[in-house]
Image: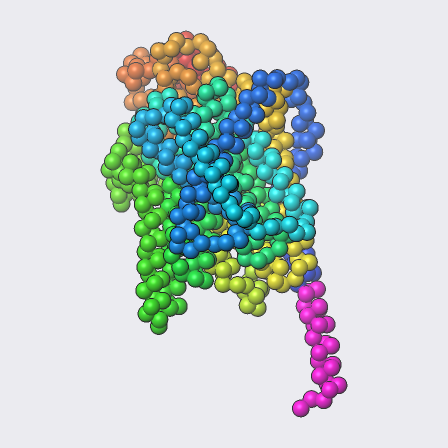
Amino acid sequence: MPNSATRSRKTSSSPARNSTSANSILLLSAIWATVLTIIFVANRQADILQLGSAVASFSDKFSGFSFIALRDTILGACVVTALAIAWFGFGALVETALAKFSPRDHVLLSWRAGTHLAYGAGITSLLTFALGVAHLYRPSAAIALVLTGLILAAWTIVRISRPASSERQSFSWAAAIAVVLPLALAGLASLSPPIAKDTLLYHISLPKAFIHSGGLVDVPLNIAQYYALGAEMNGTLAMLLGKIVNARVAEAAFGFSQFAYLPILALITFGWMRTRGTSVSNALLATALIVAIPTMYASASSGYNDVALTVYATLATAAAANWWRSPDMRSALEMGIAAGLALSVKLLAVFLVAALVIIFLLKLRQSQNDKVALRNNSRTFALSLALALVICAPWFARTWANTGSPVFPFYMNIFGGSAPGWGEQRSLVDQLSNARYGGYPKSLLDYAATPLRVSVTAQPDEPPAFDGVLGFSFLFGIPLLLFAWKRKQLDAEWLVAIGIASLWFILWMFSSQQLRYLLPAAPALAVAIVAATSALESRLKTILWITAIPALLVMITWFAQQNPLAVLIGAESRDHYLARSIDHYSIYAEANAKLPQDARVWLIDVRGDTYYIDRPYLSEFRIEHTFPQLVLSSNSIDELRARVREQKITHLLARTDILLNYQISQLVDDRLPSEENERKLQLLRNFLFDGKVVSKNNRFVLVEL
């Protein structure tokens, strides 16, 4: 037996060894963060390295002020604020129903507010869908729906007998600023006129068409109408309310309604960590890692639905972690509601369902020797899955009825389906187009390098480079996660979160590697990284926060380069802002001003933008084959003109730098002699420019047939 002196030496040396180990982890982490920072910044020639010039030119657009423009901006934000309060009221109904299974007292304010808002947004989305089916897209119906939610919100606030648990603690002001700044920038940018490609293609153009027709009508050739449009339904409701004032308020309200999911996500991320007993400082850090993702900012400010999907994926992951710890009915219902609402936003949520099923199978294996637990786990998860399917069923039933496939236009080789302007060949071409993201073809080395590439070399508007920016905070945290897991310093809840995030990443990696599609995995990974960092060494949190700074700088640069603030206050006109942001907008403006009301314009290679054209149009979805085929099958201008007129077209708006470029034009067939290809290009050139040109610039031309 060791003597007292020996025991004393061992006791005194233990803290020293722990201190040495902690310092080693700290040093290695600092080196790792430095290396990642250098690589990341070196690849940011278009944003961080342009920050100085972007900020310097930021004030160039501020040449005046318009009370009307500022008024419309504020009214757009006020419309969505009222809508969000209504969400809270409707979400309280869900909480009341869930409380019958298992009441939860002393719920933190952030978690209560976040879940109420998320559930309420889901309810109003489904109710707006019902209004669309009934062709009741009228301001009176929108007002009645929102007033109902406001009354429920007031009733909920009055009946709360005791406040939610206090969250007043000391916290890091730096982390708080890292949360507030991205929210402020994204909120301001979301109020500006929409300019993002997919937003103009369908996110806002479909609600505009629905409202114009008074309900969920067929929008010819826009295949996105068959998607689940859960987030866009709240945008439709916001536009209905804003339209009471004018079109600009409706436009701003749509953008702000899609941004509103970002503060909800922040509340949920913060509340999730706080409900697990972590400090306010740790919860703020996890939240900062999420809102500081540049692509999260881009999605929230552009009218996209990826943040909405992320909200429900995060709720489902938190519920799954609760269910793993205690497989009760309430956790199962929460998981089902969140998964159903996620599927109502985007079919991509099948990744989430697949991950939840695997978690369920692992839980069954854990309880295989306990028949009672096995039966309970199976029953609650089956109910959860059934509830998810019931919630998302309206969207897939509508698509099934209209196309013959519940998941149209995807997986046509399995489920079939058809719609005008889309077929199996186009579906395959679209799949090949989506495969370009992350590079194509991909080798085993490419897949292995994906975590590094997506963290430090990803670029916006470049499909081979993932079309976005993630930042390297998550890559920095992965070794810390592994180390904490090896030392068994992570609770089961964080392991479940890591498992779901990892499964999502794997499924994403072998599908379309668009960075936006990876966002739903980020919150689960962020909370786990912060938990691991806190368990290993508290000083690591400072380094982790610092790793988010380069991502914040990217975001600030993007905001300065776009400069939406000028148009929001009227220092820059809407037309000028759109003309400098969208190449073809000036041609659209001339078409709206010069063409007769009964004109019908064929839009060729203009990004599928149907939002800014106020005349009847023909626009093929993503893959434009019809017009090139007409050109290839025509032998003269007169023949081509006649075939175009058969489509009931009076005018044609085309992007000439694509159509007439021998290297990239769809008219060029490498199997044919170059003389034949040149002849077809010349035929098209004569067709476009020998007739009556209404308007043109160096990239676009508008011609009258």
Q: Position of residue 364 (x, y in %)?
A: 36, 65
Front residue of 53/185: it is: 185
> Which contiguous range is marked in magenta?
1-24
Q: Is residue 7 magenta?
A: yes
Front residue of 696/315: it is: 315
Please give the name of the residue rendered at 36% of the width and 62% of the height, measured from the top-left corner.
377
Q: Is residue 328 left or right of residue 31?
A: left
Q: Indicate whether 487 appears above or below 534.
A: below
Q: Quadrant of the C terminus?
A: top left
Q: Is residue 372 magenta?
A: no
Q: Position of residue 116 (x, y in %)?
A: 47, 43
Q: Position of residue 177 (x, y in %)?
A: 66, 42
Colouring mode (rainbow / by chain / secondary structure / one colour): rainbow
Please give the name of the residue rendered at 51% of the width and 59% of the height, measured from the top-left corner.
494
Q: Decide if residue 355 is in sight here.
A: no
Secondary structure of the magenta portion, mostly? helix
Q: Decide if residue 9 is in sight here.
A: yes
Q: Indicate whether 517 appears above or below 326.
A: above
Give the quarter of the image for residue 383: bottom left
Q: Is residue 649 left or right of residue 306?
A: left
Please give the name of the residue rendered at 37% of the width and 37% of the height, measured from the top-left corner.
126
Q: Quadrant of the N terminus?
A: bottom right
Give the quarter of the image for residue 693: top left
Q: Position of residue 435 (x, y in %)?
A: 41, 43
Please give the name of the residue rendered at 32% of the width and 56% of the height, measured from the top-left corner.
382
Q: Indicate whether 360 appears above or below 346.
A: below
What is the tally of numbered marks visible in this picture?
0
